[in-house]
Amino acid sequence: MADAGAERTVGFFDLAEASKPTDADETGRLHLQRRLDAIAASVRVAGGEVIKQIGDELMCAFDAPTHGVEAAISLEQ
């Protein structure tokens, strides 16, 4: 994690075409969470951290822009 006041790169990873599962849709909610967990793992491997989850989107921070790019590329593969 970077020092307070240090510049960081922020990225948002959103699941395209994801619909928000309802309370009655446990299977959908679990599937969505598994996909978000996989994204979070890629972010951490690239040296980033998840700041917060916003619905089907993750707000992430990286100490260098290249780390964010590495995370994005790993998710495309």
Image: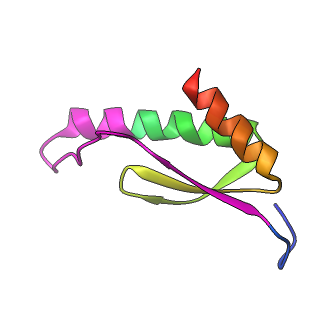
Estimate the x, y position of residue 11 in percent, counting from the top left: 61, 55
Q: Residue sitting at 84 percent across and 65 percent down?
A: 2
Pick out the residue farthest to the top. 77
Left or right: 26 in relation to 73:
left
Which quadrant of the structure image shows residue 60?
bottom right
Whether the magenta-drawn stretch holds residue 18 is answered as yes
* Up-down relation of residue 70 to residue 2 (above or below): above
Pinpoint residue 62: horizontal percent, then vertical percent: 75, 54
Q: How is the image coloured?
A: rainbow
Above-or-below relation of 56 to 41: below
Give the residues drawn in magenta, as a range.
Answer: 8-32
Figure label count: 0
> Which quadrant of the structure image shows residue 39?
top right
Q: Quadrant of the C terminus?
A: top right
Query: In front: 48, or 34?
Result: 48
Work out which residue is located at the far left of the displayed protein and give it. 24
* Residue 6 within the magenta-colored segment of the rendering: no
Q: Most extreme residue toward the bottom, as rendered? A: 5
Q: Position of residue 76 (x, y in %)?
A: 56, 26
Can residue 47 be seen?
Answer: no
Asked if residue 54 is positioned above or below residue 40 in the image, the reply reads: below
Q: What residue is rendered at 83% in x and 77% in y? A: 4
Image coordinates of residue 8 in percent, x first then y, are: 77, 64
- Examine the rendering and report whether any part of residue 43 can be seen: yes
- The image quadrant that residue 19 belongs to is top left
In the rendered structure, the answer to whether residue 6 lies left or right of residue 23 reads: right
Near-viewer residue (73 or 5): 73
Q: Residue at x 80, y 44 (%)?
A: 66
